[in-house]
Image (cartoon, helix red, strand yellow):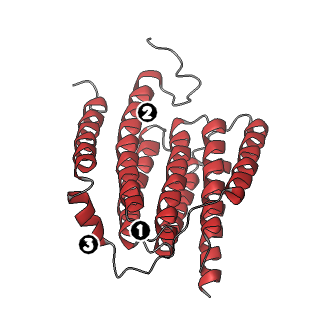
Amino acid sequence: MAEFVFWFIAALTVMSAAFVVLNNQLIYSAVALLFTLFGIAGLYVFLWADFIAGIQILVYVGGILVLVIFGIMLTNKIRSVRISHKSIQQGVGGVIAFWLFIFLFIALSKAPWLLNDSVEPIGTVREIGILLLTDFLLPFEIISVLLLGALIGAAVLSRGKA
Amino acid sequence: MNSLDSYLFVSAMLFCLGIFGVITRRNAIAVLMGVELILNAANINFIAFSKFNGMNLDGHIFGLLVIVLAAAEAAVALAIIINIYNNMNTINVDDAAELKQ
């Protein structure tokens, strides 16, 4: 049963990702990206990463996707939902992506991964919090300063001519 | 239950679809969506290796940092795209090839 649910979520993720890059309507791409991100959050749940799954939905679906849709709305003259956009060189791009996938698939299936058995944790939030404030304190502080700088930079860039 | 390979398989497919989107799309926002797919594919790998290597939570920290970087990248990229649109009235990445106007 769990196996079936896993492959269902994986198929949903990959098929909506294909829809994101293949269809011609920009809004439809954004909505398909929503399903992709939800599917990836489902994969995180299968990987026992409950905190990351929640953050994925909060940040990606609640933040980045809304930002992307705002960007679509602000950079097109809205007449209808159908904002079309062209793709070029789909043949060459498809060949490159296909051979990249073949290469990755062979590399992944032949690599001797170092694997250890793991027990299912009760929850990862507590351990992640402890790690963030002990072993990973410096990266945590750096990334928070970077996020602050990026947000101020974005606000300044998009402010327009005062 | 599921092996590591199935997660790596899904992640490789997402990565290749993201690459395909980045190199074929000409609308800057669609290119940004391709970049999001690539970042998510990398993130799945981090979390999957974390689970299958003794539930080592270092991978979760890396995933968290990737999500924060993706948020910062999306905010700055959309600000730049809106500026390009205001100045050139297009967001086709091939048309926005001049350094000044």
Q: Amino acid at mark 3?
A: Arg
Position in image of residue B57 (x %, y %): 38, 65
Task: Give the number of callouts.
Answer: 3
Callout in the foreground (2, 3)? 3
The residue tagged 3 is: A126
Q: Amino acid at mark 2?
A: Ile
The local crowd at label 3, few if under 14, some if 14 to 19, many if 20 or more residues have their Cα within 10 Å, is: few
Position in image of residue A142 (x %, y %): 25, 43
The residue tagged 2 is: B81
Q: Amino acid at mark 1?
A: Ala
Q: Secondary structure at mark 1?
A: helix
Q: Is residue B75 left or right of residue B31?
A: left
Label 2, label 1: how far apart the Cα atoms are: 29 Å
The local crowd at label 2, few if under 14, some if 14 to 19, many if 20 or more residues have their Cα within 10 Å, is: many
Q: Is residue A137 above or below residue A127?
A: above
Callout in the foreground (1, 3)? 3
Q: Badge 2 sits on which subunit? A: B
Q: Secondary structure at mark 3?
A: helix
Most extreme residue toward the top is: B101
Residue toward you, B97 or A42: A42
Identify the image quadrant of the C terminus of chain A: top left
The residue tagged 1 is: A53
Callout in the foreground (2, 1)? 1
Identify the image quadrant of the N terminus of chain A: bottom right
Could you tell me which residue is drawn at 57 percent across and 22 percent down? B95
Which is nearer the N-term, disc 1 or disc 3? 1
Most extreme residue toward the bottom is: A1
* Quadrant of the image occupied by residue B60: bottom left
Q: Is residue A151 above or below residue B10?
A: above
Residue A79 showing in the rendered view: no
Q: Secondary structure at mark 2?
A: helix
Label 1, label 3: how far apart the Cα atoms are: 15 Å
